[in-house]
Image (tube, helix red, strand yellow):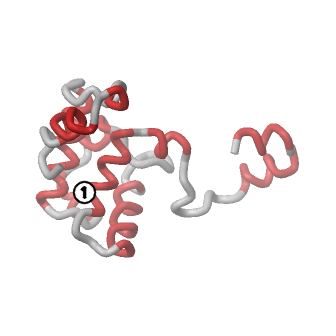
Amino acid sequence: MARLRRRDPVLARAMARVAPFPDFPIRADADSHFHSLAKAIVHQQLSTKAAGTIHGRVRALSSGRRFPTPPQILELPDAHLRGAGLSRAKTAAIQDLATKTLDGSLGLRTIARYSDEEVIEILTQVRGV
């Protein structure tokens, strides 16, 4: 998107005026291990449509267009997460994921260096994973 903006000033101005397409991948979200794991928790045992709706509602709870960051998740009252459609168990799981992401116990920045078995051992520390 940044490359398009740089190459085409007319398109860049239009992009600034037009709201983003819902569910269009935002690069920062796509690269965030936290977001990928939180999205997986949201989608567990739900239809694709229902999960997408709930994921969008949770994303809308952040101040920007992106999924809430770990600190934002922990600042949100349970009632807001539950109001977005998350069950009590999924709310607790996403909060646990946020806590463990912030305290560094998951080591998400370096997790790609580990074997599949090590990743499983690390991620199963999170409630609901």
For disc 1, the neighbor class at 10 Å (few under 14, some 14 to 19, many from 20) is many
Left or right relative to 64: residue 47: left
Looking at the picture, does residue 43 appear above or below residue 113? below
**Residue 47: percent from left, percent from top:** 31, 75
**Residue 89: quadrant of the picture:** bottom left
**Residue 41: quadrant of the picture:** bottom left
**Residue 24: percent from left, percent from top:** 57, 58
Number of numbered labels in the structure image: 1
Left or right relative to 11: residue 103: left
The kind of residue on which mark 1 rests is Leu
Helix, strand or loop at label 1? It is: helix
Residue ID for mark 1: 81
**Residue 118: quadrant of the picture:** top left
**Residue 35: percent from left, percent from top:** 37, 45
Residue at the image point whose x is 87% and y is 49% from the top: 10
The answer to which of 58 and 116 lies nearer the viewer is 116
Residue at the image point whose x is 62% and y is 57% from the top: 20
The answer to which of 50 and 58 lies nearer the viewer is 50
Looking at the picture, does residue 95 appear above or below residue 81? above
Specify the quadrant that holds the N terminus. top right
Left or right relative to 126: residue 9: right
Residue at the image point whose x is 28% and y is 59% from the top: 42
**Residue 57: percent from left, percent from top:** 37, 62
Left or right relative to 90: residue 109: right
Residue at the image point whose x is 41% and y is 62% from the top: 56
Looking at the picture, does residue 71 appear above or below residue 22? above
